[in-house]
Amino acid sequence: MRLFFLLSFFTLAITANAQLFNGTYYVAAKTGLSMREKPEAGSKVLDKIPYGTKVTTINEDSAWKEIITENMTGYWKKVKFNNKTGYIIDSYLFPWPPPKLATVKDMKQYLVQNGAIAGPKVVTRSGNASEMTEGGWELTKQLYKNGGEYHEFFGYEYNSNTYFLPGFSIQQGFLLCRLIAEFKQVFGEKEEFPLVSKTYKKDDHEYDVKVIRTSNDPDDTSPFTIEKIKIGFEDGAYYEFELFMLENQLVIFFSGGV
């Protein structure tokens, strides 16, 4: 019985990471999200829902219809907007309002935009942060009332930032990073969601992308079995980026050093 419970929980966790259940979300498509008459890409556009708009999906008895955009797998969801009822793609919905594009340039600003600070920063260190020597380090942690959190680490010729966003999926994390200037070296505005490991060149820099999965199938390209996305590249310093789930939290890790 215990094994059955664990397997059932694991399956539910993967499903929750892969799709959005009915509820309230925010449009995160920069150019807005088309609301269509039917759950089909070629169906008539009834309206355009602007970036940042709050929408509530409507329950339907029929099964959700799948759609793939920019390598992301999503589903058509029924919503009401401007006294019209139609369908939108849930791949471009966030559980929090998306970044205010004119003012939010890094993830810390995004956390501030969406949640009040929960207490003072916690700082632990070894050595003098202003005159860091080999072996010295400083770690700062900040928690927010919506459950968001960041860790900022400084070491000798190395630093990293780790962000925790409850309720976000890996696909939503990818979209979020595309919207924030802090990650422009990682994901360009028009880059698609990475489904396979690869090495490629961008702006004369070589990028090493590793897609780690829960599945052992070498032909598996589903976004639902992705456990972690790791990206490494060199641009003066060497940078490492990771995107993965920890229970119901999305974790974004970004570091740089020599």
Image (spheres, rainbow, N blue to C red):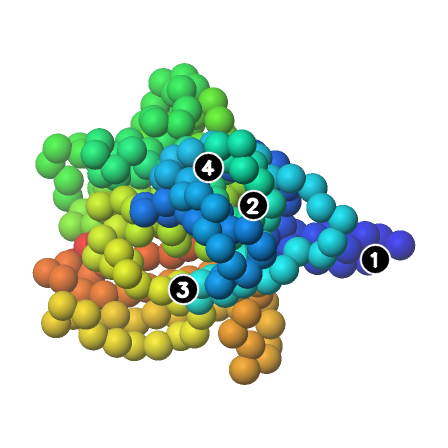
- Secondary structure beneath disc 3? loop
Name the kind of residue labelled 1 in the image. Phe
Q: How far from the left and from the top, in percent, is residue 174?
A: 39, 54
Secondary structure of the residue carrying numbered label 2? strand
In terms of image quadrants, where is residue 28?
A: top left
| SS category of the residue bearing label 4 | strand
Nearer-N-terminus badge (4/3): 4
Label 3 near label 1: C-beta < 8 Å?
A: no
Q: Earlier in the sequence, mark 4 or mark 1?
A: 1
Q: CA distance from mark 2 to mark 3?
A: 22 Å
Which residue is under mark 4?
Answer: 26
Spatial CA span between label 1 and label 3? 35 Å
In the shown orientation, is residue 134 left or right of residue 88? Answer: left
Please say whether residue 125 is visible from this viewpoint.
no
- Judging by the rendered image, the residue that carries numbered circle 3 is 70
**Residue type, label 4:** Tyr
Residue 69 percent across, percent down from the top left: 45, 63
